[in-house]
Image (cartoon, grey):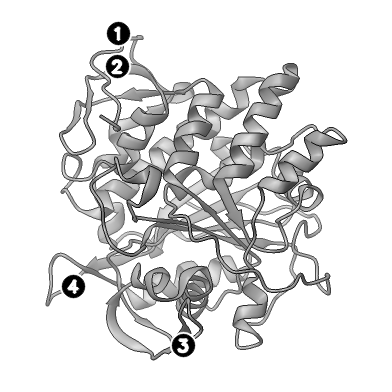
Amino acid sequence: MGEHSSSGGRIGGSRGRRRKAPAPARRGRRAGAVATWSLVGLLLVGGAGAGYVYLKLDGNLDGVDINARLGTDRPDDIDNGSLDILLLGSDSRDGANSAYGGREEGARADTAMVVHLHEGRKKASVVSIPRDTLITRPECQNREDRTVPEQHRVMFNTAYEVGGPACAVKTVERMSGIRMDHYIEVDFTGFKKLIDALGGVEITTNQPIKDSKSHLNLEPGTHTLNGEQSLGLVRTRKSVGDGSDLGRIQLQQAFMKAFIAQVKEVGVLTSPTKLLDIADTATQAITPDSELDSIPELTGFARGMGGLDAKDVNMVTMPVEYDPIDPNRVIPLPSAAQQVWNALRQDRPIPASALKDSAGDKGVAGSMVGEKAARTEPRAGSGDTTGSGE
């Protein structure tokens, strides 16, 4: 289930780089990180134009200085040619996102993925962290710079709620023992707009997917989903698998594979107008760390991933089991999870043996959706594909 690495140098995470002055995290509420890392692969693939185009795109970026907020209390930064990125979204429904699931107070990590780009950038391993995982959250600084003490048996998604991006990064680093080179976040509305700018994402559903909360009704067959429909799909939970967050993660991973495959077929370089539209949409949608919050930095990072295809990406869920005290929560399988993190830290393939007992890899949700290149059944009608925003 792993990926073989190949040689190459570090991109976008070089040591001893300049540090920008600390910048507060953007307070706009964000979610939908299921698409973020492949989104970055689209950004400015052909480079940005000069003058107002450059200023427009650069002005869209608003970074957060993770390094300044966390200081030196972090895992060693092993420079072995690989790169690790925390992709995060939140489940807040404030502002423009309020149409999706009702309004909630605060912001929590709705989706979290650790993306490991193997040396040479020819392969990637992605580890999803279930938001309902009970963990020990380390001491963090909250958004008002007050200290929030360490707490045991709290859900993983509370890290972002109490301390924003820096606390989320710190929590992942404590769990994994891996230093995150970068942080990227994307919001609900940005996710929608990006899918629409791409012209939709084509998927094949092998089973019906009907979810009243996301307003999604898909019959088996091939569908081109617009932004709202795509958002509904990646937020579907109760109607897939066992109805848990683990089933939703599998659906997100399957959609992400379809998204990557779609990106390869869009042909954005053939249309400067389309390229600018996508770049403008993407740069407005994301909040990167301060080492990626300029057009030159982001362009160099994106180009380093330009050769990745869906088949080059190995997606798994952090090994977990249902909590014996609260079956609505999961807890890490310590030995198996450590095997996964050790593999990434050593830039090696994730061993299949680490996943065999995990509740996160036993569901059926992932088999419900496939990307265009993988479908075997004939093309079907679009069916009733009501968007998630209704």
Q: CA distance from mark 4 to mark 1?
A: 42 Å
Location of mark 3 (residue) = 146
**Reading the chain from its start, which is encountered first: label 4 or label 1?**
4
Do the CB atoms of the residues marked 4 and 1 lie less than 8 Å apart? no
Q: Is residue 57 above or below residue 25?
A: above
51 on left or right of 360: right
**Secondary structure type for disc 1:** loop
Q: Is residue 244 above or below residue 157?
A: above
Residue beneath the point at 72% across and 17% down: 271
What residue type is disc 3 on?
Arg
What residue type is disc 1 on?
Gly
Q: How many labels, in total? A: 4
Location of mark 1 (residue) = 381
**Secondary structure type for disc 4:** loop
The percent position of residue 78, horizontal first and vertical second, equals 70, 75
**Reading the chain from its start, which is encountered first: label 4 or label 3?**
3
Residue 304 visible to the viewer: no
Crowd rating for badge 4 (residues with CA inside 10 Å; few <14, some 14–19, many 20+): some
Crowd rating for badge 1 (residues with CA inside 10 Å; few <14, some 14–19, many 20+): few
What residue type is disc 4 on?
Asp
